[in-house]
Amino acid sequence: QVQLVESGGGLVQAGGSLRLSCAASGSIFRITAMGWYRQAAGKQRELVAVIPNGGNAATYADSVKGRFTVSRDNAKNTVLLQMNSLKPEDTAVYYCNAQNALRGYWGQGTQVTVSS
């Protein structure tokens, strides 16, 4: 089992920045990738960014490329999402995700609201 705890959401004006953090605990040695998804009201959950183990390149949704950066701090078992140049359409609940060979795990979600 893997437990994920997110922090860092909040309210920000368009053009501002936020940084989300997700701390993993439990069977973290089996994790193969970590990342972030988001779900806006009335929409399906979508990939924001994912970063695999081993230093391979991260994958980003087209809508956030050049604005968001995902990174791992393996010493602290955390995954970070630096969000710059935020837009109102980035408003959503952001979920941390961790994958192992068998399944994915989810955090409880953190609300990000971008005002225009």
Image (spheres, rainbow, N blue to C red):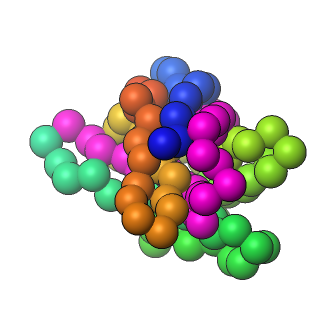
Residue 43 at x, y = what percent?
18, 49
Location of residue 91 by image quarter: top left
Residue 30 at x, y = what percent?
61, 59
Location of residue 111 by image quarter: top left
Residue 39 at x, y = what percent?
30, 44
Visible residue check, residue 52: yes
Q: Is residue 32 magenta?
A: yes
Visible residue check, residue 87: no
Q: Depth check: give the residue in front, 93 or 35.
A: 35
Q: Is residue 111 above or below residue 21?
A: above
Q: Depth check: give the residue in front, 78 or 49.
A: 78
Q: Depth check: give the residue in front, 28 or 91.
A: 28
Q: Residue at x 80, y 51 (%)?
A: 74
Residue ranking furthest to the right: 75
Q: Is residue 39 magenta?
A: yes
Residue ranking furthest to the left: 42
Residue 26 at x, y = what percent?
60, 38
Residue 72 vs residue 81: left or right? right
Residue 114 vs residue 34: left or right? left
Q: Residue at x 76, y 73 (%)?
A: 54
Region in magenta: 15-41
Residue ranking furthest to the bottom: 56
Q: Residue at x 47, y 50 (%)?
A: 97
